[in-house]
Amino acid sequence: MTEVAIETAGLVKTFGDNRAVDGIDLTVPAGSVYGVLGPNGAGKTTAVKMLATLLRPDGGEARVFGHDVVREADAVRAKVSLTGQYASVDEDLTGSENLVLIGRLLGHGKPAARDRASQLLAAFGLSDAADRQVKNYSGGMRRRIDIAASILKTPDVLFLDEPTTGLDPRSRNQVWDIVRIIVAQGTTVLLTTQYLDEADQLASRIAVIDHGKVIAEGTPGELKASVGAGSIHVRLRDAAQRESALRVLSGVLGAGVHLDADPVALTAQLSGDDSDREAAEQASRALAELAGAGIVVDNFALGQPTLDEVFLALTDHPATTEEVAA
Amino acid sequence: MSTATTEQTSTYTPAAESLNAVLAAGEAPPRPSAWSAARTFGWRAMLKIKHVPEQLIDVTMFPIMMVLMFTYLFGGALAGSVTEYLQFLLPGIMVTSVVMITMYTGTGINVDISKGVFDRFRTLPIWRPAALVGALFGDVFRYLTAAVVILIVGLILGFRPEGGAVGVAVGILLLVLFSFAFSWVWTMFGLLLRSEKSVMGVSMMVLFPLTFLSNVFVEPDTMPGWLRVFTEVNPITHLVAATRGLMQGNPDAGEITWVLVASAVLVAVFGTLTMRLYNRK
Ligand SMILES: Nc1ncnc2c1ncn2[C@@H]1O[C@H](COP(=O)(O)OP(=O)(O)OP(=O)(O)O)[C@@H](O)[C@H]1O
Ligand SMILES: [Mg+2]
């Protein structure tokens, strides 16, 4: 039985009529990455802000290492760090000044704060940019200075709110590596993301949230099993053959086949439990059946399940931005 | 610069060794005192002035304009002689300008607090008002700058305070102290109102009557009764009387006490309201 880092019960936050967080129960085991996956407006930031003592819940309760986020806010603050969705560093100051500032606020003397800052800048590959204002940093560098500020004092719980949104693949990989190293040292990381791929890469457990509610929870393997091992996208030469292609694919792969917006394309879910080989076999069998039925396939692609597919599987509606489709 | 930026991103590979060393050394020092946290935020405010010096324009140009405008506009008409009027006007103009500048505190807080960095400050286990008190320290520097600029312009134009250097210094000190206390009104509005613009609007509506319907430009004896009643209770009137007394070499203990008590009340009332809003945000 591992220790519990974060526990919430029936957590609620409303903004006017909008139930941004609508009764969330989470149990985050200590020492791992916990992924909170959801589309825009799902309530991820709102939930994280309540856990980090920035917003007062309207209902339910939340504890961080046993401390209540409302009644024992200071004890919680001593344990957590937050890297917000939007830069939580001061853009007017230099990278070094930002870190010295946080160091001083944590209680370091001036020399100690300076030492700590340069140590962090070096570890995050920012020594050359130390004396430049953060507003002149690239997106990747901003994220890194932000994370550096969050581990100035090694936190017990680190909240990363969409740490890689807007980053190029290389910077994203750097952030992933940093997160892995931080977790290996014993910090619990709660990470929000819109990318299943990212949660899959980093998290040992994932909660999928939509409209402020948890709609699924489990290990990445369990989640993917519920969606299938991925999908196959097929582009036909002739749009007239799409109906028969749909029948053939449904015959081979079962129910999870749907027509794309593109009139010559369709997508089929691959079932099977988290085994890429099984998925590949299914895909090749499907392609063979299509050829056997005389349907000309111009092009096909195998896809990892996307957030959209997870949503389709879990809610019967695609991941909607904000509450358009509610 | 952009090439350096790209290069940095591409060559950096997170190294477990150095990151582990950093994490292992991440023991929390003892929590800083309230005073030390506020001072650190004051340092932040000074750094912002260093990086964005343009923000000092309004505390230098605006006061210079005020002195020149009112000295020459009213000088001849009201007192017959510009130099003579200046002896009366300068302390009042100094008060007006500095008190007007306090409104930037509200807009500043409103903008600053909407940025993500305040989320980080608010997750630190520090004395909660520190961030706001520290920001006001930076503003106090701006108030001092404005007061000194006005003093220099005044001296050039012929202001000869009888209270001497000490009288002037104590006068400025009193003014800055009151402005610090008064700023809590704006921090409250800065937190209460949604946009920078609405903060500005409210500030104008409060500041114009306060500064003009006072004894800054003329002694209230010439005013109609109802107006005199307002000027009598107007804190600016008392502040001007106290500052003017100090600078002219006949300090009025009653007025000075009035200003000190008003400052304490302002901090107690608006400081409390501000902190309540800040904690709720
Ligand atoms: N301060 C606020 N006032 C009013 N409504 C808010 C506020 N903050 C969030 N909301 C609303 O609450 C809902 C959840 O927002 P939240 O920012 O938590 O979503 P999110 O999952 O973080 O989305 P994103 O991926 O876009 O960051 C949205 O409908 C949003 O409009
Ligand atoms: Mg968000």
Image (cartoon, helix red, strand yellow):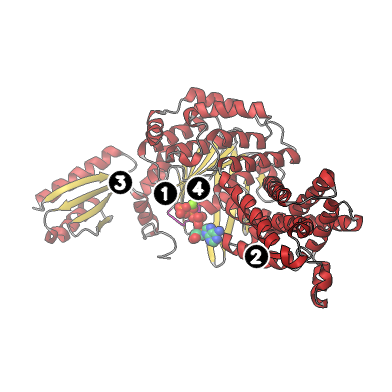
Prevailing SS of the magenta stretch: loop
Q: Is mark 3 within 8 Å of ligand 1?
A: no
Q: Tag 4: residue type? A: Tyr
Q: For the magenta stretch, what is the residue range? A: A39-44
* Residue at (63% x, 29% y) in the render: A113
In depth, the one of B15 and A299 nearer the eye is B15
Chain of residue at mark 1: A
Residue denoted by label 3:
A230
Q: Residues within 10 Å of mark 3 (few under 14, many from 20)?
A: many
Residue denoted by label 4:
A86
In depth, the one of A8 and A14 nearer the eye is A14
A100, above or below A298, in the image? above
> Which SS class for mark 1?
loop
Q: Is mark 1 within 8 Å of ligand 1?
A: yes
- Residue A96 coordinates in the image, percent (x, y): 55, 33
Q: Tag 3: residue type? A: Gly
Query: Can residue A123 be spotted in the picture?
Result: yes
Residue denoted by label 2:
B204
Residue denoted by label 1:
A194
Q: Do the dots labelled 4 and 2 sit on one chain?
A: no
Circles 1 and 3 in contact, beta carbons < 8 Å: no
